[in-house]
Amino acid sequence: MKHRFKRFTQKVAIAILRMADPSKYEAPKNEYEVEALAICKRLSARKTSTLLMSPISGKRYIRSKDNQIHVIIDGHLVTIVNHSYSYVIPMEGKSHERLIRMFDMEVETRRNVMEVEIRANIKHSLSNIYQNLLNEQV
């Protein structure tokens, strides 16, 4: 009984939150948002693309060396730039949150890979130092 009451109150709270700000729970508003999300997802998943995040301004950058496409995510605006075109696409609600989460997760994944590589080098270096110390004492 206690569990049912808790679940009921959770469902009511979620319903109230959705009514308070429906923009967070809407699907993307137009095809431009859908296409921009797909472009950002595909570019950030490529290992040849460069991802950069500015901690002060909060801007996020994706640069693809293959297609020479640059994406700037600044607040709720996504700017897609090439040598021949430039699009500024506003993103709101859930699509914006999805884009930011996707970008941040890819940056975090790359950071983890880099950290593992760094730590692997440290282990080898410490082993070498230890072996050198053992060789000196002999």
Image (cartoon, rainbow, N blue to C red):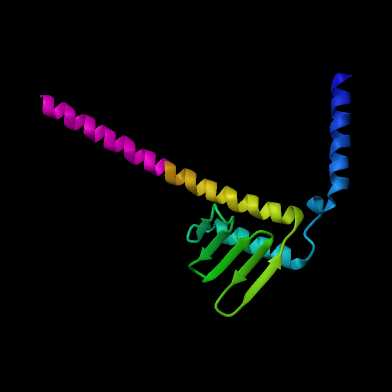
In the rendered image, which quarter is residue 82 located in?
bottom right
Residue 35 image offset from top left, x and y in percent: 69, 65
Q: Residue at x 28, y 33 (%)?
A: 126
- Decide: is 117 above or below 70: above
Q: Is residue 55 magenta?
A: no
Q: Residue at x 51, y 71 (%)?
A: 68
Which residues make up the magenta segment? 116-138
Q: Determine whether, in the image, residue 12 is placed left or right of residue 109.
A: right
Q: Residue at x 55, y 62 (%)?
A: 62
- Decide: is 120 above or below 79: above
What is the magenta segment's predominant secondary structure? helix
Q: Determine whether, in the image, residue 102 is placed left or right of residue 119.
A: right
Residue 124 image offset from top left, x and y in percent: 29, 37
Q: Determine whether, in the image, residue 38 is placed left or right of residue 60.
A: right
- Decide: is 35 above or below 5: below
In the rendered image, which quarter is residue 42 located in?
bottom right
